[in-house]
Amino acid sequence: MSVNTDPMQDGFTLEDILRDTLESTYIDDAYYAKLRNDMQEWEGCGTVLNNEERHAYESLILHENWLLDRRAFEKWYQLYSRECVYWVPAVGDLPDAERADPQRQVTIAFDDRRRLGDRIVWLRTGVAYSQLPPSYTSHVSTAFVRLPSENAGEVKIRSQFLIQEMRAGHEIQTFSGWMGHVFIKEDGVTKIARKVVCLLDAPRNHHNLTFLL
């Protein structure tokens, strides 16, 4: 199982991101139905990754963590497919499809590719005043398992996470829960098509969640 994750060239800029996200029209009823189906599949019984799967998928998730912790947002953005979603439900643990439905329920974050580009521009330019001073994070991921999926060409990997976030002048925040990554091949490259971050304490008030989990 060979995986090409080469597209993170140096020099990818905010201007590149802005040009890349002029249109984002793929979030429709069919896409929401796919997300609801994801939530049902995330409840399945996962299998421990074999060596090839660890090299292909676990290593990519750990690399994503590394980029986020170093605030390398432009390179992180390139891990995602052209039609992607970064989703943080407002319900905790392993919510069912009805309670977590982003088409009908409030979410903490629900970003398509254009919205992800906007978020990075805000973080880089200081428009997001809630990130002045900026957050710095430490991601730890473990318990990687592969879930069966009825969608041909997709691989679902679920993992547990612990994130610590620090901003100057503020107390350290700790977040835990599980993440689901859906991987696809796009132009021969393994990409993240959908990422769901289910916080254990999602229904509670949080001090500041404007950084990237």
Image (cartoon, grey):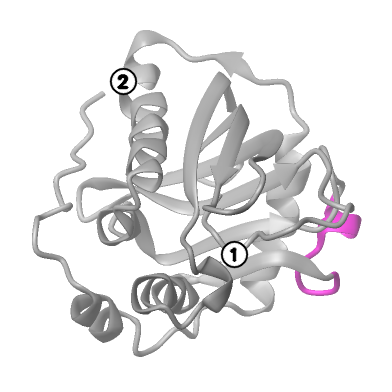
Task: Please report the residue visible at 35 percent of the width from the left and 36 percent of the height from the top.
Answer: 66
Mark number for residue 210?
Answer: 1
Q: Is residue 24 left or right of residue 200?
A: left
Q: Are marks 1 and 2 in contact (CB under 8 Å)?
A: no
Asked whether residue 212 is in view, the answer is yes
Task: Please report the residue visible at 27 percent of the width from the left and 76 percent of the height from the top.
Answer: 17
Give, as a single range, the part of the protein colored magenta.
97-105
Residue type beneath disc 1:
Thr
Please, what secondary structure does the residue beneath circle 2 have? helix
Q: Is residue 82 left or right of residue 7?
A: right
Q: Which residue is at the front of the view, 14 or 157? A: 14
Q: Is residue 101 magenta?
A: yes
Asked whether residue 154 is in view, the answer is no
Q: Is residue 110 left or right of residue 115?
A: right
Residue lying at the far left of the rendered structure: 10
Quarter of the image where one finds residue 67: top left
Mark number for residue 12?
Answer: none
Q: Quadrant of the N terminus?
A: top left
- Circle 1 packing at 10 Å, graded few (<14), some (14-19), many (20+), is some
Q: Is residue 94 magenta?
A: no
Q: CA distance from mark 1 to mark 2?
A: 31 Å
Quarter of the image where one finds residue 117: bottom left
Task: Please report the residue visible at 23 percent of the width from the left and 47 percent of the height from the top.
Answer: 189
Residue under circle 2? Answer: 55
Residue lying at the far front of the rendered structure: 169
In this view, 28 is above or below 207: below
Residue type beneath disc 2:
His
